Amino acid sequence: MAPSTNRSRYVWMIVVGLMGLLSLAEAGCLKAGKCCKGRDSTCVSQGWRMDRTHGTCYCDQLCQSAMDCCYDYPQACPALACVVGEWSHWSGCANQCTPTYRVRRRDVLQEAENGGEPCPHLEEKAGCLEYFTHQGIECGHLHVPAFITTFEYNKARRKRALSPDWASHTEDPGYCVEFKIESLSPACLTEDRPHARWMLYLREGYTVCVACQHPAMHIRSHRCYGDGSDANENQILHWQAVGNARCYGSWRKVRQADKCSCPMVHSFIFT
């Protein structure tokens, strides 16, 4: 065979090889037009993989954890983070006349796809206490300790006439009581739920302010249970955080005032 003929054949083989490499380089999820959810053994293509090996590669959602994605999977199947809506308004208390919880929820607007950031929690519960039955009967006398919660709860508390005896024009603006915390349970210091982090600001030796406002007030006495109004000087009183039955302690009443001077983080309300 003539040298020119052999040279031509060799060049042709190189060209064919380069074309093959180009074809392989172009193979992948984009060329196959595939992007599948979950683990799908049929969602495959041929080409380079993300681990730099060549052969069968995958375009399904779990290929990243299996380390067998096609090289262009991130472009063909971009990660989409979960998107959630705004929190709903807090619900009313689940039950009346006993420390219980209220709920707020949010909806998923966009599910996470292709390894995107998963959805955060969609429901939160927080403590609350209603002092009247659905029939308007006062029932707060069943509880002796002072039940307290974050001052933020007062913004969401439903403003409604709980009894014909309490008309809006007679609503008392309330008062504030300062207490010095003497003791508290360890559970208060380990609370990390977002809606209950206010308990972390309860500390031994700290002075805290607790507001007494409608509708936590007793209709006739216009006082809140556990405010220490009948306590002797230096008498130890007891409190409990609504929303965590294991967070409780004792305090001494310092003074009562129309307005207290505590920072917001150390301000709470009777519930």
Image (tube, rainbow, N blue to C red):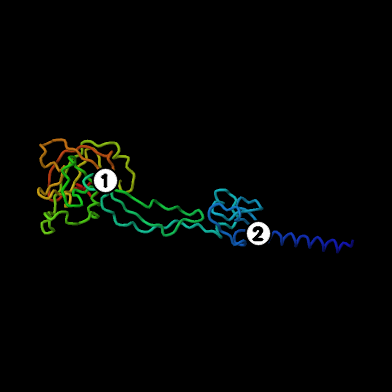
Q: Left or right: 22 with respect to 258?
A: right
**Residue labelled with disc 1:** 100
Q: Which mark is residue 25?
A: 2
Q: Left or right: 9 with respect to 99?
A: right
* Residue 209 pos. (x, y %): 19, 46
Residue in the foreground of this view, choosing between 124 and 268: 124
Q: Quadrant of residue 252?
A: top left
Task: Look at discs 1 and 2 and give the one toward the viewer.
Answer: 1
* Residue 99 pos. (x, y %): 24, 44
Q: Quadrant of residue 82?
A: bottom left
Mark 1 or mark 2: whose residue is earlier in sequence: 2
The total of numbered circles placed on residues is 2
Q: 10 Å neighbourhood of mark 1: few (<14), some, or many (≥20)?
A: some
Q: Amino acid at mark 1?
A: Thr
Residue at point 17% right, 40% down? 144
Q: Which mark is residue 228?
A: none
Residue in the foreground of this view, choosing between 137 and 204: 137
How far is the residue under mark 1 from the one under mark 2?
A: 62 Å
